[in-house]
Amino acid sequence: MPGRVVCSTATRTRETWQLVEEALGAQPQTVFEDRVYEASITDVLDLARQAPADVRTLLIVGHDPAMRGLTLKLAGDPFDDAEAGALARVRVKYPTAAIAVLSFSEGWPELGAGEARLAEFVVPDDFHAGHGKRV
């Protein structure tokens, strides 16, 4: 469950977040941020680095190519075949409504290139194909 959500102010991302929030059945602290729209990788990374220290899980609802690029920038060397496969999928395509789950052990200000692990990458087709993945 995200402790904080940073969502683009674009209509599509706001609608996406509303659907996710309803499905979660929770209302985490949500900030609608103009800077996410048309953001660069560095812009989104800077927003993540500004997350409050007490936030353990941050969800950013943003746009490609920044979200794909940020995922690839943050993900370190693959730990196993599953992570290598997930990274390969991100490199090929980061479709609308994809979810990349990254983990790292440092504080938000220290988040940087290669500092995270790509724990999961889920795309809408994973659900349509009957895989029943759950994030």
Image (tube, helix red, strand yellow):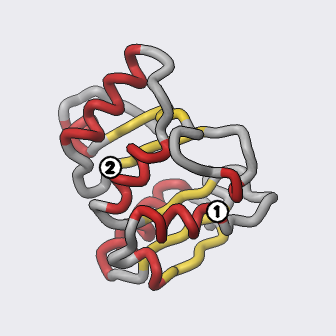
Can you tell which mark lies on residue 98?
A: 2
Q: Do residues under tags 1 and 2 come within 8 Å of each other at their CB atoms?
A: no
Residue that badge 1 annotates: 49
**With respect to residue 70, does 11 lie above or below?**
below
Mark 2 Cα-neighbour bin, 10 Å: few <14, some 14–19, many ≥20 = some
Mark 1 Cα-neighbour bin, 10 Å: few <14, some 14–19, many ≥20 = some
Mark 1: amino acid: Arg
**With respect to residue 24, does 39 lie above or below?**
below
Residue 11's quadrant in the figure?
Answer: bottom left
Near-viewer residue (64 or 19): 64
Query: Percent position (x, y) of residue 113?
Result: 52, 46
Query: Percent position (x, y) of residue 130?
Result: 23, 29
Query: Percent position (x, y) of residue 76?
Result: 50, 33
Secondary-structure class at tag 1:
helix
Label 1 vs label 2: CA separation? 22 Å
Near-viewer residue (83 or 23): 83
Give the number of marks.
Answer: 2
Nearer the observer: mark 1 or 2; the answer is 1
Q: Residue furthest top?
A: 81
- First in residue order: circle 1 vs circle 2: 1
Mark 2: amino acid: Ala
Query: Percent position (x, y) of residue 122?
Result: 35, 39
Residue 104's quadrant in the figure?
Answer: top right
* Residue that appears at 38% across and 15% down: 81
Near-viewer residue (17 or 56): 56
* Residue that appears at 30% across and 75% down: 12
